[in-house]
Image: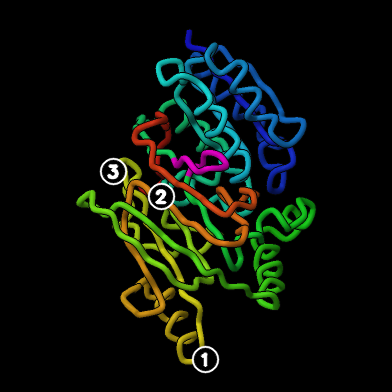
């Protein structure tokens, strides 16, 4: 009988996991799992549980929002690769970008079934100066929305809470003068220096609930990130062009840089606020972001299959 550690955030979303806990555990039991259950008690609790006890289990399943997912990835990456258990995810937050990209069901019982019965694949992980991330490392406009929105508001309003908080951030748009150094797909070093409103180094098609990148461009196993940088917009015409480009996912306009890379270094003369999977990623002047290929074995079943 294989050993399963189930960690869930009881406050995520509208507490769907708590309401479906019995059915979730029954799903695990039917897969003949020896189950240990731990509800998180505070921030970073998921990291500590996995870091301290993860090696004892064959499979770790985490349930919560993108913050819980981020903590689970950081806990798993603290373990030696050969001692790292497989990982399953039951999305229970307000946006669930990573789960949406993978096609994991928002129904917690269906997601639980996929976590124990689905196929496994080796998933790339992001390593930033300030921590690991599952799907996005970002700075600039809107990036503080997730962790600036109170949990109670998220539970009450769902994704609408993010939209309302995002509107507030429009009143305080800041740009950053940055030097971006990266390795292109041929392994050659490239350098960009410009003023930017927003940037993301990602392994996802959805960010903040928005479908920003084409699904066909995303491969969670290719060892590469998709990097999108939005330059400072200087007039209403450039703003409209940028909006149109985001809607059509066509980043050939002058307002954007878009490329793939396994390693990106972004430096500034001033501290820049970063987010990792929508959570506070710290204030740093120099951020180095690397792809750790095939670092975690994800078990899931896509609802699209």
Which is in the foreground here, disc 1 or disc 2?
1
Q: Identify the disc placed on residue 236.
A: 1
Which comes before the other along the chain, label 2 or label 3? 2
Spot occupied by residue 234 in the image (x, y as percentages of width and height): 51, 87
Q: Secondary structure at mark 2?
A: loop
Q: Which residue is mark 3?
A: 222
Q: Quadrant of residue 251?
A: bottom left
Q: Which residue is mark 2?
A: 203
For the C terminus, the image quarter is top left
- Mark 1 in CB contact with mark 2 (< 8 angstroms): no
Measured in 3D between alpha carbons, the distance from the residue under mark 1 to the one under mark 3, in whole angstroms, is 38 Å
Q: Around disc 3, counting alpha carbons within 10 Å, would you say few (fewer than 14), some (14 to 19), or many (20 or more)?
A: some
Q: Secondary structure at mark 1?
A: helix
Q: Residue at x 55, y 69 (%)?
A: 176
Q: Residue at x 42, y 85 (%)?
A: 241
Q: Residue at x 41, y 63 (%)?
A: 228
Q: Which residues are magenta?
A: 126-134
Measured in 3D between alpha carbons, the distance from the residue under mark 2 to the one under mark 3, in whole angstroms, is 10 Å
Spot occupied by residue 168 in the image (x, y as percentages of width and height): 72, 73
- Direction front: furthest residue: 269
Q: Secondary structure at mark 3?
A: loop
Which comes before the other along the chain, label 1 or label 3? 3
> Total of numbered circles in the picture?
3
Chief secondary structure of the magenta portion: strand
Q: Is residue 212 magenta?
A: no
Measured in 3D between alpha carbons, the distance from the residue under mark 1 to the one under mark 2, in whole angstroms, is 31 Å
């Amino acid at each position: 009988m294989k050993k399963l550690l189930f960690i869930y955030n009881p406050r995520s979303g509208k507490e769907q996991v708590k309401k479906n806990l019995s059915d979730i555990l029954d799903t695990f039991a039917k897969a003949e799992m020896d189950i240990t259950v731990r509800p998180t008690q505070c921030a970073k609790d998921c990291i500590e549980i996995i870091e301290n006890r993860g090696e004892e289990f064959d499979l770790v399943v985490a349930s919560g929002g993108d913050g819980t997912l981020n903590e689970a990835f950081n806990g798993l990456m603290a373990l030696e690769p050969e001692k790292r258990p497989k990982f399953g995810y039951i999305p229970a937050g307000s946006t669930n970008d990573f789960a949406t990209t993978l096609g994991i069901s928002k129904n917690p019982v269906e997601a639980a079934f996929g976590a124990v019965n689905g196929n496994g694949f080796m998933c790339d992980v992001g390593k930033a100066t300030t921590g690991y991330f599952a799907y996005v490392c970002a700075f600039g406009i809107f990036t503080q929305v997730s962790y600036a929105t109170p949990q109670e508001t998220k539970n009450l309003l769902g994704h609408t809470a993010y939209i309302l908080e995002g509107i507030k951030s429009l009143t305080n748009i800041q740009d950053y003068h940055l030097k971006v150094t990266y390795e292109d797909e041929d392994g050659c070093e490239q350098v960009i220096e410009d003023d930017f409103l927003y940037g993301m180094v990602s392994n996802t098609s959805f960010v903040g609930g928005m479908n920003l990148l084409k699904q066909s461009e995303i491969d969670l196993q290719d060892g590469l990130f998709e990097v999108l940088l939005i330059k400072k917009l200087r007039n209403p015409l450039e703003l409209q062009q940028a909006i149109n480009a985001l809607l059509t996912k066509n980043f050939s306009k002058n307002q954007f840089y878009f490329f793939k890379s396994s390693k990106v270094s972004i430096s500034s003369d001033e501290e820049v606020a970063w987010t990792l999977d929508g959570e506070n990623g710290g204030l740093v002047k120099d951020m180095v972001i690397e792809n750790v290929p095939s670092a975690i074995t994800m078990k899931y079943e896509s609802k699209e299959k």
